[in-house]
Image (cartoon, rainbow, N blue to C red):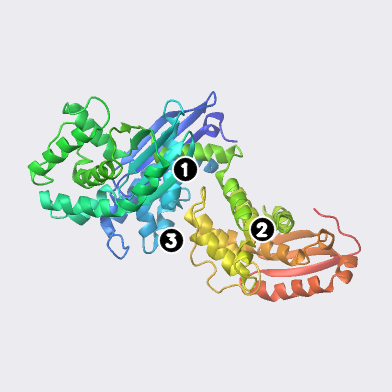
Amino acid sequence: MTPPERANTYAAVDLGSNSFHLLVSRREHGQLRVIDQIKEMVRLGGGLDHQGRLDSETTDRAHACLARFGQRLRGIPDDNIRAVGTQTFRRLRNVNAFLMVAETALGCSIDIIGGREEARLIYLGVSQGVSGHEGRRLVIDIGGGSTELIIGEGLVPIEMESVQYGCVSMTRRFFSNGKITTKQWHEAISSVLADLQELRIRYQQAGWQKTVGSSGTIKAVASICEQQGWSERGITPVSLKRLIRAMIEFGTIDKVKLTGLSERRHPVLIGGLVVLAACFEAFELRHMEVSPFALREGLLHDLLGRLEHRDPRDSTVAAFKKRYSVDPNQADRVKTCALKACEQIANDMFLRPVHRDLLGWAADLHEIGLGVSHSHFQKHSAYLIEHSDMPGFSTQEQLFLAALISNHRRAIGSGYTESLPTRLHEPLRVTLFCLRFASVLCRSREDSAVPAFTLAAQDRSFTIRFSEKWATKHPLTVADLEGEVEMLKKIGLRLKFSLSPTTKTA
């Protein structure tokens, strides 16, 4: 049994392009209290080439850091930990091979999240530390490989965007020679401003009353400006211009010496400063407050929401069902049947609650492609799932849903597991059986045609028991199930039937 103090301990791991963060909190009197923090400048993005390959030195540094984090995470329940990878993980060429070693070192799974999901979590984290919830705020977070910009009100984001500029990527692209010249500065900031133009119009139409910055770059800039006496609190256009002028006067990155600038932030400050200055100019900012909170705090609060049945993924699925006019009766029928099958074999097949949840959401969404075409609608459904922004879902979760839905009827693709990390291959195989089985039983779209059944599993063999009377009245369904026997053999599963005079659902 997990000790009470461990059961109430939660951890968030933020694996950014510049730094890796571990935050451990304990829940006391309904509040999260930070009990430990670890930050290491891994500079993952700095070791990535244009083809998405990570050099061996950076790989070793990342794995060593994760092993240290893994030691601190030992003893914390798996369900109380959430680890995410951001921009550099999204760009890794062979990400599943990297994850296999990384997850072993860390001792838990790592979710790769998209840019807008990263933005949502950042906003959630920053909002926890903002006093009051009046008016709209613009939140800007400059990471190592990307920058997230969010307009929100209270705890609800309204506009979210992720642009592919960060302190590491900008430093590598425009200041790789170590020099800081006026020409290099103007080339760098012009590049960012060009990409911000379309976003600027949309965001100014939405409007905001307060600007809040988060991340290491913004905290470093605020610290420098305050300690130099250029601003009393936060960041202003005047203090920013004085810092830019000072950086250019130094001439090279190595010569930069500023009170308030840490040794760890020093090599990539210039790239982050370019992005920040472009945001001030594009959005005509007059003052930026600085938040101590960011993605990792958002992860913790999102994790608590999931554990307390306030899962944003439920809202996302409900919105998709409405948007694509899903037949609610059929979706519920298939979901009920698939989950009933899953519950009877979950323990024997080592399925976790998250796998059950993914199966349920796949059943909810398996027909959204009917809005595109009835022919091969499962492929259209899978495409929409894989390529849409789905708040709350990680990249791997969307790929898992897409693989389930794409293969829930007709032929199963030979490479149906290829896009997923190895740890998800077996759960996908078993939940795919459950969804295909439910789809066959619910084909007639009538509740009365769905039989009672019992299901048993041993190794990769499933035995289904039906009422003989039902089987006699539903020859088409029985024929479809017999076809499933051959189809499931192709993915290493065996299916057998057993008929009895009467059958009660387990």
Left or right: residue 280 compared with residue 136: left
Left or right: residue 237 compared with residue 449: left
Q: Which residue is more in the foreground, 272 or 153?
A: 153
Where in the figure is residue 155, as x and y percent of width and height? 49, 35
> Cα distance, mark 1 to mark 2?
25 Å
Q: Quadrant of residue 262?
A: top left
Say if residue 498 shows up in the picture. Answer: yes
Mark carried by residue 326: 2
Q: Quadrant of residue 149?
A: top left
Left or right: residue 161 compared with residue 343: left
> Cα distance, mark 2 to mark 3?
33 Å
**In the image, what residue occupies the spot 52% across and 29% down?**
5
Image vertical order of residue 347 relative to residue 458, above or below: above
Task: Give, as a three-letter code, the residue at label 1.
Answer: Ile
Say if residue 16 shows up in the picture. Answer: no
Q: Quadrant of the N terminus?
A: top right
Q: Nearer the viewer, mark 1 or mark 3?
A: 1
Task: Give, as a three-letter code, the residue at label 2.
Answer: Val
The residue identified by callout 1 is: 158
Mark carried by residue 96: 3
Task: Give, as a three-letter code, the residue at label 3.
Answer: Asn
Left or right: residue 164 compared with residue 183: right
